[in-house]
Amino acid sequence: MPVVPATEEAIGRAAQALARGEIVAFPTETVYGLGADARDAHAVAKVFAAKERPRFNPLIVHVPNLAAAEAYAVFGATARKLADAFWPGPLSLVLPRRIDSGIADLVTGGLDTIALRAPNHRVAQELLAEAKLPIAAPSANRSGRVSPTMAAHVEAELGDVPAMILDGGPCPLGIESTVVGVAGDAPVLLRLGAVPREAIEAILGQALPLAREDAAISSPGQLERHYAPNTPVRLGATDVRTGEALLAFGPHAPQGAVAIINLSASGDLEEAAANLFASLRRLDEAGAKAMAVMPIPERGLGEAINDRLRRAAKAR
Ligand code: TXA
Ligand code: MG
């Protein structure tokens, strides 16, 4: 049974496991990550194998802070401003990578850029401090499935892959980090996520355009049909059809669903984001004919929630 409460002692053992080239699942403020020593190509290969992830999909490297990040990437003025404003926190920056950084090429999928983030979670920060190494960690789900927001999700999906699953309780934000590319002329939004676009634009003092889907092979988080449950998903539902489960939002949920979960009865978008993936998993298990999803307002975190829901709804 690899799930263990994230005590100081367990984190110490997890750090040693990482240093030995083993894989450790750990909580962050966004979702659980499947971590490996980013300098160890063999360890990173185990992560790819476990996720069954296409090789071109590069990983985010987790670091304690900006000072540590500078060993791995070149920070210009804009990148520095964003790191100052949002780190530690749910923002990943894609930056020109330093050639002699020691990061395994497999981590970056052969790109000349690297994604970095400093997580804002006690367990992740203690693990980084104990291990003293950069941790490459994708979300701890199989490729194409929804991200885990609880240790039990990791255990159910990846079973015995990690040497340990550190249980730090449910992830407070529940949706993946926002990914911003700062490697080109102007910053671009590569993946909608837990930092709302407006908050980043306020710091930049300029618009942050979303990279086009077809241009986004450089950020496969953009790939359509990511984040897919098994049950077909019907968006924008204002009623419930026969045999459907309902993913509700707000106080006015229609009746008649075979199963119902409300992302936030009060209509709070942060609460909805925190509940999103666990709710998709639970409704998926209801064995319903389809999953009807009520409309979510397209503002603040609603933009990222709708992005994940649209991908979940793509016909398979
Ligand atoms: O919240 C999160 O970001 C979680 C936690 C564990 O930190 N991690 C996560 O990792 O969601 P993953 O691997 O599932 O998603 C990483 C995203 C993908 O969309 C990937 O394409 C993009 O970051 N990415 C990574 N490196 C990149 C690079 N060099 N250029 C463009 N996109 C990159
Ligand atoms: Mg992922």
Image (spheres, grey):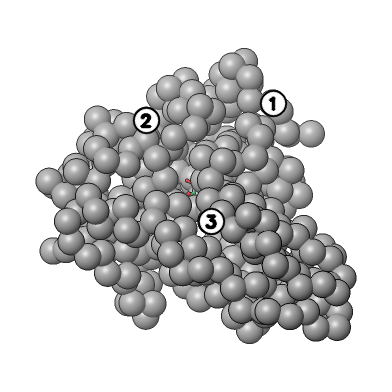
Residue position for label 3: 269
The kind of secondary structure element at disc 1 is: strand
Q: Nearer the viewer, residue 126 or 19?
A: 126
For discs 2 and 3, the disc positioned in front in the rendered view: 3
Could you tell me if residue 169 is visible in this image?
Answer: yes
Q: Position of residue 197 (x, y in %)?
A: 34, 59
Q: Earlier in the sequence, mark 2 or mark 3?
A: 2
Residue position for label 2: 64
Q: Quadrant of residue 248?
A: bottom right
Q: In this rendering, is residue 234 above or below 73?
A: below
- Kindly identify the amino acid type of the residue bearing the numbered disc 3: Leu
Residue at 58% across / 22% down in the picture? 11
Q: Nearer the viewer, residue 95 or 309?
A: 309
- Kindly identify the amino acid type of the residue bearing the numbered disc 1: Pro
Q: In the image, is 73 to the left or to the right of 125?
A: left
Q: Residues under labels 1 and 2: Cα distance?
A: 21 Å
Q: In this rendering, is residue 18 above or below 174?
A: above
